[in-house]
Image (cartoon, grey):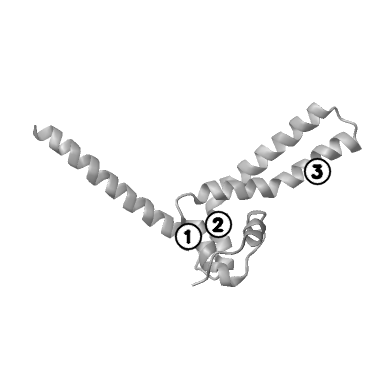
Amino acid sequence: MSGRPGPHLRLWYLLGGRLPQRHREWVFRQATKPTWLAWFTVRMFLQVLPLTVAITLALVLGLGSPLPLAIACGSLGLVVGVYFGVSYAIESTDHRMTKYGYPAGAAAAVRKERTKRDQERYAQVWRADRAAENDS
């Protein structure tokens, strides 16, 4: 089993880089843990940020735009870029997993199974409580 990559490799991964195959199990765990979407959003934010900063600077320095307008344009670009990326989070993550040798849809299947177990556990607890309330 592969270990956790070092801090420099994790930063590289967050910035959109690909890790060596020896870290494929860690990447899969990252794509299937309960907080996967939050980390995906952070990853997307860090990937879109340099482009939006470059556009903002180009507006100010190259075109002479007022700074507040350039910041507003850059911010809107950042929001739209992250929103677009997160809109395809499931597909993007599953595609990334195929690059590490996992079958298509493997990460989504693991997340779906965990959600199903969580829903069953929730239903058992709350249905048992409601049944006890109805019996009294």
Location of mark 2 (residue): 93
Contact? badges 2 and 1 (CB < 8 Å): yes
Percent position of residue 30, x then y: 51, 57
- Nearest to the observer: residue 47 or residue 106: 47
How far is the residue under mark 2 from the one under mark 1?
A: 8 Å
Percent position of residue 3, x then y: 53, 68
Q: Say which amino acid is labelled 3.
A: Ala
Return the disc, 2 or 3, that comes first in the chain's sequence. Answer: 3
- Nearest to the observer: residue 8 or residue 105: 8
Element under label 3? helix
How far is the residue under mark 3 from the one under mark 1?
A: 34 Å
In the rendered view, would you say 51 is above or below 60? below
Q: Is residue 74 left or right of residue 35?
A: right
Q: Say which amino acid is labelled 2.
A: Thr
**Residue sitting at x 86%, y 34%:** 60
Location of mark 1 (residue): 107
